[in-house]
């Protein structure tokens, strides 16, 4: 894939087989809502709400120049007392190995919405971004929360961070055979340089678990303008039993005028 920053757009997981009696999942809304009524969506025991509050723009601590301003820190709050106290569930979402640094604060909210990996099974999907470094690197966390009715609390069902600008991505799949799955593409450390492709889906415990991991056919710097996850869709579908060679190729959203495989990866031109 062409080098350059690819913001993790949020996330994905396999179609779950729910009971025929379960209610149909409602359509998923647009991303990045700033306030979400969790009590209504999850039918919680307490009046849970998700709210955000962003501070004023600040001088970019990376550049250190007075005229270089960046968005202020975002306070993320999951509360059942109208924001008087916030659950600690999201504390440290952008922290690596327990060590806080300049990139441990959320300054961008890329995604915030209720998703339905399975009928009648809502989850809260969040994607947070830190400040950017001089070379465009940015730490991004994708977190999915499930509601634990016994504890009357929200718990982490999925949590993953990426931190560089070399085409990694974490994406929630909202439709198709992979509906509800979370797919990630993360660079390998050795040649031939490609990506580790990982698929996670929800289990009976209401947590995401890894069901597939392999080294991509897509190579870093191969000139393919498609996102890595899109170029790997034929491989993902084949390994999970949704596609066979000779069948119509699984295509990304948008134009793909000449879909064909090159060394196992999907190209559209």
Image (cartoon, grey):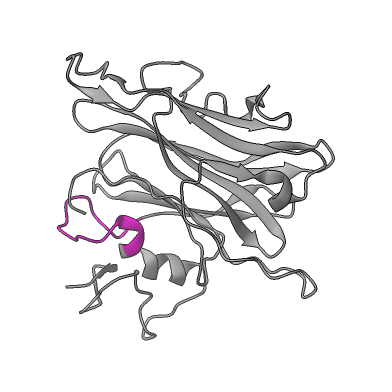
Q: Image quadrant of residue 266? A: bottom left
Front one among 138 and 32: 32
Front one among 123 and 258: 123
User: How many labels, in total?
Assistant: 0
Q: Position of residue 81 (x, y in %)?
A: 73, 28
Question: Can see residue 36?
Answer: yes
Question: Can see residue 144?
Answer: no
State yes or no: residue 122 in magenta.
Answer: no
Q: In the image, which residues are magenta?
A: 216-230
Q: Position of residue 166 (x, y in %)?
A: 25, 42
Quarter of the image containing the C terminus?
Answer: bottom left
Q: Position of residue 211 (x, y in %)?
A: 56, 56
Q: Is residue 172 above or below residue 178?
A: above
Q: Image quadrant of residue 51? A: top right
Q: Residue at x 24, y 18 (%)?
A: 62
Q: Position of residue 195 (x, y in %)?
A: 33, 49
Q: Residue at x 51, y 42 (%)?
A: 126
State yes or no: residue 220 in magenta.
Answer: yes
Q: As drawn, is 145 to the left or to the right of 245?
A: right
Name the magenta segment's main secondary structure.
Answer: loop
Q: Is residue 256 above or below residue 171?
A: below
Q: As drawn, is 140 to the left or to the right of 208?
A: left
Q: Residue at x 27, y 32 (%)?
A: 137
Quarter of the image containing the N terminus?
Answer: bottom left
Front one among 189 and 116: 116
Q: As drawn, is 194 to the left or to the right of 236?
A: left
């Amino acid at each position: 894939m062409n080098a350059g920053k690819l913001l993790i757009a949020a996330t994905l997981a396999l179609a779950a087989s729910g009971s025929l009696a379960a209610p149909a999942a409602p359509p998923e809304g647009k991303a990045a809502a700033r306030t979400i009524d969790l009590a209504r969506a999850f039918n919680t025991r307490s009046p849970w709400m998700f709210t955000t509050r962003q501070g004023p723009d600040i001088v970019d601590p990376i550049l250190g120049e007075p005229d270089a301003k960046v968005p202020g820190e975002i306070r993320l709050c999951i509360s059942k007392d109208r924001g008087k106290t916030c659950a600690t569930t999201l504390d440290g979402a952008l922290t690596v190995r327990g060590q806080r640094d300049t990139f441990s604060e959320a300054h961008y909210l890329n995604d915030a919405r209720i998703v339905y990996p399975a009928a009648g099974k809502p989850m809260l999907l969040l994607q947070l971004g830190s400040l950017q470094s001089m070379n465009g690197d940015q730490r991004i966390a994708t977190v999915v929360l499930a509601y634990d009715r016994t504890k009357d609390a929200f718990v982490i069902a999925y949590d993953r961070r990426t931190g560089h600008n070399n085409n990694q991505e974490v994406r929630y799949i909202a439709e198709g055979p992979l509906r509800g799955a979370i797919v990630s593409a993360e660079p390998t450390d050795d040649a031939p340089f490609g990506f580790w492709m990982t698929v996670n889906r929800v289990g009976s415990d209401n947590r995401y678990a890894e069901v597939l991991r392999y080294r991509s056919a897509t190579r870093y710097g191969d000139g393919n303008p498609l996102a890595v996850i899109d170029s790997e869709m034929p491989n993902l579908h084949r390994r999970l039993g949704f596609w066979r060679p000779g069948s119509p190729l699984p295509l990304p959203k948008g134009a793909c005028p000449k879909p064909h495989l090159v060394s196992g990866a999907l190209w559209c031109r």
